[in-house]
Amino acid sequence: MSESFDDSANGHTSDSDVPGHVKRTAIDLIAAYADRDRKELDEVLPRAFDDADAVVSELKVIAAFLSRRVQQTGVVWKPADSREAVARMAAEMLPPELEFAVSTAWEAHTVGEEEAAERFTRGDPMVYVHMLAAFAAAIGLAVYKRAELLSTLRQVTGLAE
């Protein structure tokens, strides 16, 4: 059983009240971006759409965990690295109009301009889903190999075998 995010020092990030399918969806989105696999992304998007707000929330928790891991390991990861990585992944994985929304909203978010980020999303939680999944994949791959990243995320969310 996983515990609250505050227990992340013990390897747990996710609230136990979050349904397993939401956690799996978040990890599957990150996997699709980490693999740069459009087909995999297209397969998981309907699940993400069905629970968009819960998936966004879970992706925020995972992104915060991975951000802490980057700091703990000493990997140099600047806001510019984040913007570039999200923009590159969005360009590879998304249609142009969604790519623009994701890239510009993430850029605004990284410089603390939340109102501008909200305007770019046009209230669509799926833009946040893409932003956070691309970011989590990019920052996660800065610390872990792909298989290790996904295994670690399963463990910290309480989904480990």
Image (cartoon, helix red, strand yellow):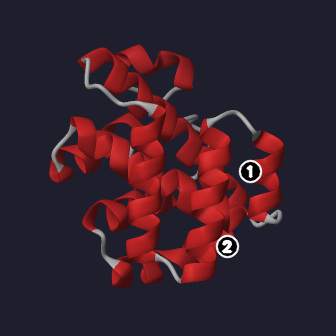
| Amino acid identity at mark 1 | Ala
Q: Residues within 10 Å of mark 2 (few under 14, many from 20)?
A: few
Pinpoint residue 137: horizontal percent, then vertical percent. 36, 51
- Which residue is at the front of the view, 142 or 12? 142
Residue occupied by mark 2: 50
* Horizontal side of residue 116 vs 44, given as left or right: right
| Amino acid identity at mark 2 | Asp
- Is residue 19 shown above or below 144? below
Q: Would you say residue 129 is visible in this rendering?
A: no
At mark 1, the secondary structure is helix
Q: Residue, x 36% and y 64% (percent of image)?
A: 33
- Is residue 12 shown above or below 39? above
Residue occupied by mark 1: 117
Pinpoint residue 131: horizontal percent, then vertical percent. 56, 56
Q: Residues within 10 Å of mark 1 (few under 14, many from 20)?
A: many
Pinpoint residue 129: horizontal percent, then vertical percent. 59, 60
Q: Residue, x 57% and y 46% (percent of image)?
A: 58
Identify the image quadrant of the N terminus: top left
- Which residue is at the front of the view, 77 or 28? 77
- Is residue 150 shown above or below 129? above
